[in-house]
Amino acid sequence: MIVRTLKDIRKSDRHVESAGWHSDRLLLKDDNMGFSFHVTTMFAGEELHMHYQNHLEAVLVLKGAGTIEDLGTGETHQLKAGVMYALNNNDKHIVRPTEDIVCACVFNPPVTGREVHDENGAYPADSEPALTD
């Protein structure tokens, strides 16, 4: 069983900060769950261009508000507490928080932990096998 607290994660190297957001990675590849689980905050006033080419992601907004634009379809959706979006086709998108957005995120395949977005808005593919005990 794995038990962790956000308070402890935020004081560890599993707390990752980047331009426009920070993320607390509660489960990572080396936890051998087959996915990673993060609590991420995206900051109000930012325009976050993302395109997870190597990962699928599902996001549940817990707090805050903004929009997400699907750059493939041109559709814009409202984000607020209780809204879930899934990037099931490696969708290229822009998140525009009007208030800080706190969300729970799941990535498949799992991330290793220190990833930040590259020039394309993606996390790099991980070619290393998961650590085992």
Image (cartoon, rainbow, N blue to C red):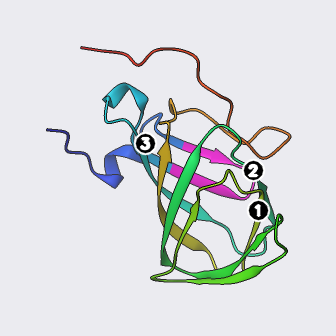
The residue that label 2 is drawn on is 51
In the image, taking residue 112 as reference, residue 9 lies left or right, namely: left
Q: Which residue is at a point 52% across and 69% down the rendered structure image?
A: 102
The residue that label 1 is drawn on is 93
Residue 57: where, in percent of width, then height? 55, 53
Residue 18: where, in percent of width, then height? 69, 47
Q: Magenta stretch: residue 20 in it? A: yes
Out of 60 and 65, give the one closest to the viewer.
60
Kind of residue at disc 3: Ser
Kind of residue at disc 2: His
Residue numbers of the magenta segment? 16-23
Residue 92: where, in percent of width, then height? 77, 56
Residue 124: where, in percent of width, then height? 68, 31
Determine which of the numbered discs, if any, sits on residue 36 in the image: 3
Q: CA distance from mark 2 to mark 3?
A: 17 Å
In the image, taking residue 77 as reference, residue 88 lies left or right, namely: left
User: Taking the image as drawn, is residue 98 in sight?
Assistant: no
